Image: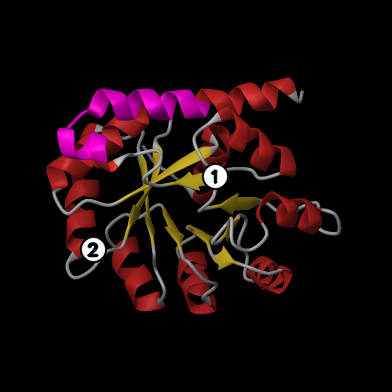
Amino acid sequence: MAHDRVSVLQALETQGVCPVFYHPDPEVSLNVIRACARGGAPVVEFTNRGDFACDLFGEINRELIKTDPEVVLGIGSVVDNGTAALYLNRGARFVVSPCLVPDVAKVCNRRMVAYFPGCGSVTDIGEAHELGCDIVKLFPGSSVGGPDFVKAVKGPMPWVKIMPTGGVDPDEASIAKWFGAGIVAAGMGSKLVTDEAVKSGDWASIEAKVRATVDAVAAFRASKG
């Protein structure tokens, strides 16, 4: 299945929750990613962690393309254009950074791949828009103003699409607070894909937790019309 830039953006906004995950074992990683997809979140951010991570990503993504074509696998924690290029050549469908890196935006734009830069100020967000970024990652979400920051930014810039990572929990109260402020999606790491579930190989519990969180986002949106 082809995953172009527009379809990736639409899929991410639709599911509302982006699992953020890394594990050095390819089989464990495949099980987690497939559980997330079964739970309604086929758009998954795999994080760039250490030496040979790009080779691991390539191995995982090559298998997913054959067996689970609905999965949209992107890469996170990218801070330079060379690393971005390595992952794009291994089929990354989107790239995420903890900070705003103009050179990464340029590499992604050349390949028509979505780039979500980490932004912590209105100035960052404005520069990201100039670089063609459709969705910006608010990072670290809870430390740069949280939902109040989102509301404040969307006053003068109602077109901004924000995806915080850090501070959004997989529960109804947190979802209501953040999505009520106007975010379009949220990155969730170990609170969604727990270390305990991964260590015990409890893929069913990961699927169930992801499903409950995706459903909670959908229910909140429906309640707001």
Residue 200 in magenta? yes
Disc 2: CA contacts within 10 A as few (<14), some (14-19) or many (>=20):
many
Label 1 vs label 2, nearer the camera: 1
Secondary structure state at the residue bearing disc 2: helix
In the image, is 176 to the left or to the right of 115? right
Q: Is residue 217 above or below residue 20?
A: above
In front: 40, or 172? Answer: 172
- Name the residue rendered at 23%, 55% in the picture: 57
| Relative image position of residue 114 (x, y in whole percent) | 51, 56
Residue that label 1 marks? 168
Q: Is residue 203 above or below residue 108?
A: above
In front: 149, or 69? Answer: 149
Q: CA distance from mark 1 to mark 2?
A: 27 Å
Magenta stretch, residue numbers: 196-214
Q: Quadrant of the N terminus?
A: top left
| Relative image position of residue 88 (x, y in whole percent) | 34, 62
Please tell me which of labels 1 and 2 falls first in the chain: 2
Which amino acid type is shown beneath numbered disc 1?
Val
Which amino acid type is shown beneath numbered disc 2?
Cys
| Relative image position of residue 94 (x, y in whole percent) | 44, 55
- Name the residue rendered at 40%, 38% in the picture: 192
| Relative image position of residue 116 (x, y in whole percent) | 53, 59
- Name the residue rendered at 85%, 54% in the picture: 155
Residue that label 2 marks? 54
Q: Is the magenta region chiefly helix, strand or loop?
A: helix
Q: Mark 1–mark 2 contact, CB under 8 Å? A: no
